[in-house]
Image: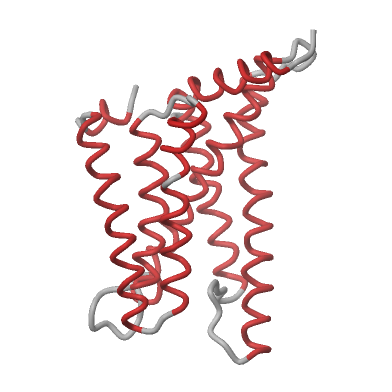
Amino acid sequence: MRVRDWLGISKRRQKQLSYAMELGLVGIIFAGIWGGSTTVVVNAFVGVVATQIPPILERDYDIPMDPALTLWITSAVFLHAFGVLGLPGAEQNLYGQLPWFDHVTHALSASVVAAVGYSTARALDEHSPDIHLPRQFMFVYILLFVLAFGVIWEVIEFGLGELARWQGNTALLTQHGLEDTMLDMVFDTVGALVVATWGTVHLNDIAGYIADQLEARTPE
C-alpha cells in the first residue's frame, strides 16, 4: 500500500508539499542570516542540497522517484532545519522546547538512511547470481545498517561538540548526555523498523534501476 493510499494524498499534492517545504528551507536560511545564526544557516543549507538530490537523480540519471519518496526525504530535512530555527520569539529552538521533537526527526531521518541501505542491497541481490539475500535477512540488515550509521552520527556529533567547546564556539550538532544518545539510537531503530516492515514497496523501482545499471556496466 502506498503512502497516498494511507493518507489520501495524491501525487500532485505530494509534489506541492515537497515544493512548499523546499521554499520553507530557503526562508529558514534567510532567517538564520537575519538572526546571525551560523547553525541555522548551515543546517538549512544542507537541507536544501539534500532536497535537490531526488530531482537530479530523476532528471540526469533516469532513476524513477515516486513523489512519496521525495516528500519523505524533504520532510526529514525540513523538520530538522525548522527544529534548529525554532518558533519566533522563543528562547529555545524546538529541540530545546519539545523533547519529543528530536525523537521524531531521528526516526524520520533513520528511515531515509534505511531506504538507501535497502535499495543498495536489493539491487546487488537482483544483479548478482552469487548474492542471495533472504527476506528475513533483509529485515535484520536494514536494522544493522541504520544502527551502524546512527553510531557514526553520534560520534560525529560528539566530535563536533568537543571541537566547538575547545574553540569557544557554538556546536552545529550537539549531544545532551548518555540518555539523549541512547534515545537517539532507540528512535533510529524505530525508523528502521518502519522501512523494514512497510516502506520497502516504495523502493523496488529504485532498486531495480540500480540493478539494471550494474548489469549494463558489467563486462560480458
Is 34 situated above or below 189?
below
Residue in the picture at 62% in, 69% down: 157
Which residue occupies the foreground of this view, 156 or 59?
59
Residue 17: percent from the left, percent from the top? 24, 44
Residue in the picture at 33% in, 25% down: 2
Q: In this view, does 89 lie to the left or right of 106?
A: left
Q: In this view, does 104 lie to the left or right of 183?
A: left
Rendering colour mode: secondary structure
Residue 136: percent from the left, percent from the top? 63, 23
Residue in the picture at 65% in, 50% down: 149
Query: How many labels sit on residues?
Result: 0
Which residue occupies the foreground of this view, 158 or 58?
58
Q: In this view, does 4 lie to the left or right of 158?
A: left
The residue lying furthest to the front in this view is: 60
Query: Where is the N terminus found, in terms of image quarters?
Result: top left
Q: Is residue 61 left or right of residue 214?
A: left
Residue in the picture at 66% in, 41% down: 145
Is 143 situated above or below 4?
below
Residue 15: percent from the left, percent from the top? 26, 37
Is 141 situated above or below 98?
above
Residue 174's quadrant in the figure?
Answer: bottom right
The residue lying furthest to the top in this view is: 220
Query: Where is the C terminus found, in terms of image quarters?
Result: top right
Is 182 situated above or below 205?
below
Residue 8's quadrant in the figure?
Answer: top left
Residue 57: percent from the left, percent from the top? 49, 34
